[in-house]
């Protein structure tokens, strides 16, 4: 026991604690900080997250047919607002864009329409148009909900396969993106890496010191040393 406390004193030295704190601060800003402060990152991820924050408290994690119809009604209202915006924009008329549908189906060979698309989504960066695209992604995911679950069942391991089969039998369909889950998994992996690096740094002097002094050979030559 005395030997144990002696080794603990070597490990928990003030120099080692300062080094460990410094390394963890550096690793936090290099690996960890971005996934916390800049989530969600960019578009359309930011808009997907905004839609989910709005509708998950309202409908829950899974939605039924009636809730989906309410969701589509709200989408149609947003489309009408987008149509009104485009009808009142002279630059939309100049580019030949008369409705949101024509904006979605713009001619890639038409330079005027290309420029107007860039204007709406990148220069003006109008949130409503980005949100419409995010909602369309949710609608398409719901329309393909059964095929999506069958695909997950086909390529999943046993535990996940049972989960997806239960969702299919209970008609609990996924409606939102896996953006939050992916970010959580990335953060979890990075945190595990930081802990592993910290532990390696923390105990490495103990082994290095013994190797440099060739203490391992001496310890192994005695009965008590071999147990240690």
Image (cartoon, helix red, strand yellow):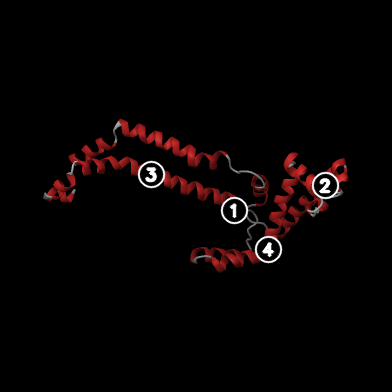
Q: Report the front residue among 4 and 23.
A: 23
Residue at the image position 63 percent from the left and 58 percent from the top: 174
Q: Report the front residue among 116 and 16.
A: 116
Residue 112: x %, y % from top left:
82, 47
Q: Secondary structure at mark 1?
A: loop
Residue 91: x %, y % from top left:
85, 42
Residue under label 1: 178
Spatial CA span between label 3 and label 2: 54 Å
Does residue 209 appear anywhere in the picture? yes
For disc 4, the neighbor class at 10 Å (few under 14, some 14 to 19, many from 20) is: few
> Relative to residue 49, is residue 100 drawn left or right?
right
Please report contact status of discs 2 and 4: CB closer than 8 Å, yes or no.
no
Q: Counting residues from the N terminus, which is met first, the one under dot 2 or under dot 4?
A: 2
Residue under label 4: 144
Q: Secondary structure at mark 2?
A: helix
Spatial CA span between label 4 and label 1: 16 Å
Q: Nearer the viewer, mark 3 or mark 1?
A: 3
Residue under label 3: 197
Please report contact status of discs 1 and 2: CB closer than 8 Å, yes or no.
no
Q: Nearer the viewer, mark 4 or mark 3?
A: 3
């Amino acid at each position: 026991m005395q030997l144990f406390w002696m080794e603990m004193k070597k490990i928990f030295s003030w120099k080692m604690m300062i080094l460990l704190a410094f390394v963890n601060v550096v690793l936090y800003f290099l690996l960890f900080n971005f996934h916390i402060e800049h989530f969600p990152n960019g578009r359309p991820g930011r808009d997907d997250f905004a839609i989910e924050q709005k509708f998950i408290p309202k409908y829950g994690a899974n939605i039924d047919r009636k809730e989906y119809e309410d969701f589509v009604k709200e989408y149609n209202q947003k489309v009408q607002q987008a149509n009104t915006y485009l009808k009142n924009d002279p630059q939309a008329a100049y580019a030949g864009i008369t409705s949101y549908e024509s904006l979605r189906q713009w001619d890639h060979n038409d330079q005027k329409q290309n420029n107007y698309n860039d204007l709406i989504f990148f220069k003006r960066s109008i949130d409503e148009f980005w949100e419409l695209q995010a909602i369309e992604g949710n609608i398409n995911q719901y329309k393909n909900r059964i095929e999506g679950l069958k695909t997950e069942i086909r390529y999943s391991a046993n535990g996940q396969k049972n989960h997806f089969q239960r969702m299919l039998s209970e008609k609990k369909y996924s409606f939102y993106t896996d953006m939050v889950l992916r970010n959580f998994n990335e953060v979890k992996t990075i945190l595990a890496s930081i802990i592993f690096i910290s532990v390696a740094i923390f105990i490495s002097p103990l082994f290095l010191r013994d190797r440099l002094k060739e203490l391992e050979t001496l310890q192994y030559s005695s009965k008590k040393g071999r147990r240690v």
